[in-house]
Image: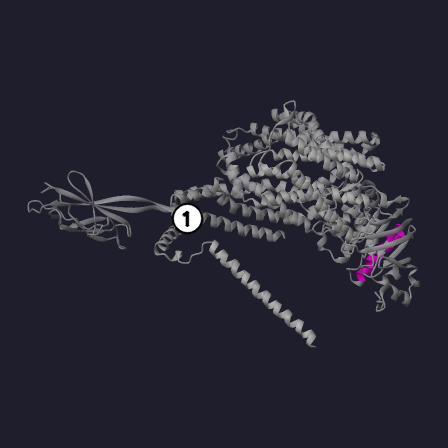
Amino acid sequence: MLIIENLTKVYDNGFMALDNISLEIPDGQFVAIIGLSGSGKSTLLRCINRLIDPTKGRIIWNGLDITAATDDELRQIRRRIGMIFQQFNLVKRSTVLTNVMSGRLGYINPVYSLFNYFPPKEKARAMAALERVGIPEKANNRASALSGGQQQRVGIARTLMQEPEMMLADEPVASLDPATSHSVMKYLELLNQEDKMTILCSLHFLSLARAYSHRVIALKDGKIEFDGHPKDIDNDRFKMIYGEDAVEVEIH
Amino acid sequence: MMNTKTPMRSNQILKRIIILLIIAVVLVVFSYGWTVTDIDLAVPQEPQRQENVGNALRELLSPNVFTQDYEVSAYTTNFRITCSDSEIIPPTTPSDSPYIVVEPTCGEGDETVTVFGYNLPANGLARMNWIGEDGERRIRQVNGENEDNFVVRDDGTFSVQIQVPRIRGTTGEIHTVELQARIPVGLPRFSNTTNLVMEKMIETIFLALIATAVSILPSAILSFMAAHNLMRPIRAQFGSLMVSFTLLPVGWLLGVLLLYPVGQFAFRLGSENVLVAFGAVVVVIAGGIVLLPRINTLKDLIPIVIVRRLLNTALITILILFIVGLIGGLGELFRASFPRGTFANVSTFIDDIFVYMGAFIGSLGEIIEFTLQVVAGLTGAFALSSLGTSLAKEPLKKTDTTFNHLLGGILGALGGAILLGMTATIGLSAAWMGLLTPIVAGALATTLLPQAYRWFVPKPEVPNQTDRNILRVLAWTSGVIGFFVTFTLLNVGQSLVEGMLPAQQPVLTINGANLYQYVAFAMGIGAVFGGFAGGLGGVRGTFPFGSAIYNTTRTILNTLRSIEPLIMGLVFVIWVGIGPFAGVLALALHSIASLGKLYSEQIESIDAGPIEALQSTGANRLQTIMYAVVPQIIPPYIAFTMYRWDINVRMSTIIGFVGGGGVGFLLQQQINLLQYRNAGVAVLAIAIVVSILDYASAAIRERYT
């Protein structure tokens, strides 16, 4: 269970990205977070694993207060929360295998990292993760040589190394074409169903949210505009979230 | 309509006036520049100067690169002084071998005769000699001109007119007419100057190579400290930082006392005996393989955190010193194992290589031996202070409010006193170094007023611009006040004006170490500033540790970079004497500053995505740098290192002007001796080497960026 209480984030330039947000997300839910650019989707996700320190409020996950964790405790917590990104955030010059294995760093003795050494069993684990996302043959390619969809699958494989209980996905398909988008979303659905992973996924397209999520949270100007089942979003709600001029686009 | 048009007009007029004003100002600036730089177009047109520069350029552009060996051969014929019928000089019969004929074959002194030559080396340089019966050789000028030498024609013949010398009482003597012809032998070869230039050029290239290589590691380390994207986010708890700061000297002492003997022991193990050294290496490697994977099991073995951390730190520091000492010892052992002549019966070349390598690896070992004490001190200082930080952090977090500020005050005072004590000790070295203490004191004081303000006005829940502006103004105010207070109290102004060092009366002497009044005063100021800052902020407050390191590193790099290597060369020549060593040191120091800046800019421009991604997996800072930063910066680092080598070769060609070795020294010598043809060789060599390196480094850089 993830509990967010009165979460507020004001950036140093005075911009209020999140305005007193409270949420409860039960384990195993697939939550889509939608909203316009700048509505606070990325900030909300990054506050949960404290890539961004919130200004105010508390985030409690399975009884652990993430907002009050010390550096060491925070690393322990982050190991169990996977995250994938719009720009994939792979090291482009490193091999796919190295990129995947680097997801395991939180578990590995830091002294090994000085010598760029991974134990053999971690290599095996990385190969298994790559097999799961369907690209084991790319293990020794440079990450930059892969297509966008493949890179995002490497990103998913990297989080699999963490054996996460929750996955934060920050617009994972915004840089991909529609067909590839669905393939990546299907992997997230698989993780949700097979591994019982809680998934928080910010999305641009409402149609994707409708197709994959149990629950949609819509943000507008840092506030929750809508929180409910995807099919409850009718045309009026849609216009409230995206503005009067918006028209819904289907993505197949 | 009129109302809106008029201001438009006046606006346009104003714009034109401003443009005119700008033109006027530019004109004034450039005319002043023209005068200041002594530009006088009449000077270069003076005939004398034009001739001089023409000669100098001609010689520079006719470099004395090649030389040629010659063989001089002589061919003779006879001549009778005063003609007579009784003796006939037999005519020379034509043949294939070189010969000369004189016509007529007899005559008086001062008569002009013609000499013909056949089958001689074409275009060879030749001269005529007259040899009397006294055996004396007299050079004859040819064709009545003021010229000794003449050139043989293409077909190997010549004819010249010479004068019979008038020598008293030689009537009836038979004299010899001799032709000396100069024939080139073998191919043209490099002149001595060229050989010397090539030797110095190799020295130059290696000077640049060593200077660049030496600078890579320090500048790579500095570049991380000078990259704002890595340093800015690092904030440390004030209390634990102060604990670590005050533990630095303690750790140093412990390191020197306890770790130094370990290093010395390892050095002896490594240097004395091959068998013992081999055993030590095997033990270290085996120990590493066995122990390293089991470090985590220590957790279950020793449950008390403090004891475990202490043991961990002790083990790691001992291991570091042991390995460093062992490496140094092995270096010494290497040099001792291959003295000159070890491989003499195999090949002198291999023998030479081992002697060079022995000298190099041996001196690396020596460097380690010299610096072992410093390494031990530093290791101890850093280990103890990082141990102190991590142990103090959590307990300090839980201190109650009163204790928080009280402890903050005490630790702040201690830290401030140590900091300003250090700067004041540096300030004792030179008058202008005295400025360091007020500057650092000012930086320390910047926290005072903002924190005092915060004491009364609590931090707004939502950050706002007004609050930030107030803090900024207060920080500047208190910084400037802090600077001037320290400046006045320490009487820095007087020592600046008089160029004198601060008075050095010791107020306290412990074990022969003096505490000077000046330093004590500075420590007092540091204690007051630090005490207030720490007391107001409290031990739980955060300190922008990363920004402090970033700013300090940037300042040092920028200052170093602004000093030209030639000036650094001057200082190093005084320190280590004239020669390439001084050049290496000067170029290395400048390269550290320059590469440090270039490298850090590369770090600042990397893709931040992977850093964020690895942080989100729970990797620590070191791991994030190893896996997200390092792979991204290796190619530009290689490119910039090549570029720097290129620059260093160019700079090392002139570092010799101040005595820094390399081809520059030779160039300066030849210019001072007005030997422009020899100087031309050096200039040509520099041009060739620089352009080859330019091309090579550009090609390599292109591949890596």
Q: Position of residue B71 (x, y in %)?
A: 30, 44
The residue stretch that appears in magenta: A179-199
- Dominant secondary structure, magenta: helix
Q: Which residue is mark 1?
A: B680
- Depth check, front residue: B467 or B630: B467
Q: Coloring scheme of the render? A: one colour
Q: Is residue B323 visible?
A: no
Query: Is residue A185 found inside the magenta-colored segment of the image?
Result: yes
- Residue B296 horizontal/vertical position (percent): 80, 34
Amino acid bearing label 1: Gly
Q: Residue at x 53, y 58 (%)?
A: B29
Q: Is residue B615 visible?
A: yes
* Chain letter of the residue beneath label 1 in the structure image: B
Of residues B649 and B346, which is closer to you in this image? B649
Q: Quadrant of residue B209?
A: top right
Residue toward you, B182 or B198: B198
